[in-house]
Image: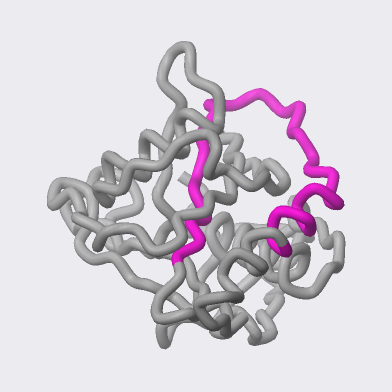
Amino acid sequence: MSQGARGVQHARDTVAQALRAFTPATAEAPGRRAAVAITLVANEGELGFWLTRRVATLRAHAGQFALPGGRLDDGEDTTTAALRELHEEIGVRLGPADVLGRLDDYVTRSGYVITPVVVWAGAPPEPRPNPDEVARVFWIPLSDLDVEPRFVSIPESDRPVIQLPLLDTYLHAPTGAVLYQFREVVLRGRPTKVGHLEQPVFAWR
């Protein structure tokens, strides 16, 4: 989704319209609530999003690629949590008016119910990653999502494992599933569901 300066507002409206036309699924499964932010960022007229790589010293999911996000604090909803985590992890503060919509809840093997929140940043300041959590922030153009994922069978589950090619590696669920659904719903206009997509066994803890 390459845009000139005059097309950035049109891109925002297009994304918002696609999300309004989509009815996100809310998971009824018990679990700890969490939220992640798909933050849309214009860079020289081209639209992309931020992806982080976690520091290697974290107790959980160290070194993995992830969208900014984390658990809901007491009294928070998913929108508030996604915006707070975006600020805490990469130093960018946005508000409720910047939220365009959300995608399906994804239930993880480790007991989390993750809600993806789509946020519009436009052309914000450079991110300032929190060194305690984030090793690096990547700006990924939306055109990089125009690749087909692999769906792999594993003996431990009858659900397919998604592998989304990005950054010279493969992203697995939940991040790979969330970005695949964003691609399908927003960029291709297809109301694709991803709750059935499996995580690799190493993420089952």
Q: Nearer the viewer, residue 88 or 12?
A: 12
Please determine whether, in this image, residue 1 is positioned above or below residue 134: below
Q: Quadrant of residue 196?
A: bottom right
Q: Position of residue 182 (x, y in %)?
A: 67, 63
Side of 109 where 16 appears, left or right: right
What residue appears at the point 74 percent right and 33 percent down from the top-left corner?
27
Q: How is the image coloured?
A: one colour
Q: Nearer the viewer, residue 25 or 1?
A: 1
- Residue 38 among those drawn in magenta: yes
Please determine whether, in this image, residue 193 is positioned above or below residue 94: below
Q: Quadrant of residue 24?
A: top right
Q: Nearer the viewer, residue 53 or 198?
A: 53
**Outermost residue toward the front?**
6
What residue appears at the point 80 percent right and 40 percent down from the top-left corner?
25
Quarter placement of the N terminus: bottom right
Q: Position of residue 45 (x, y in %)?
A: 48, 79
**Outermost residue toward the top?**
75
Q: Position of residue 11 (x, y in %)?
A: 64, 68
Q: Position of residue 79 (x, y in %)?
A: 54, 33
Q: How many numbered marks does the figure carry?
A: 0
Magenta extent:
14-41
- Residue 22 among those drawn in magenta: yes
Please determine whether, in this image, residue 125 is positioned above or below residue 94: below
Side of 124 where 36 appears, left or right: right
Side of 122 where 106 appears, left or right: right
Side of 140 where 2 appears, left or right: right
What residue appears at the point 60 percent right and 79 percent down from the top-left corner?
145
What residue appears at the point 70 percent right and 48 percent down from the top-left corner?
103
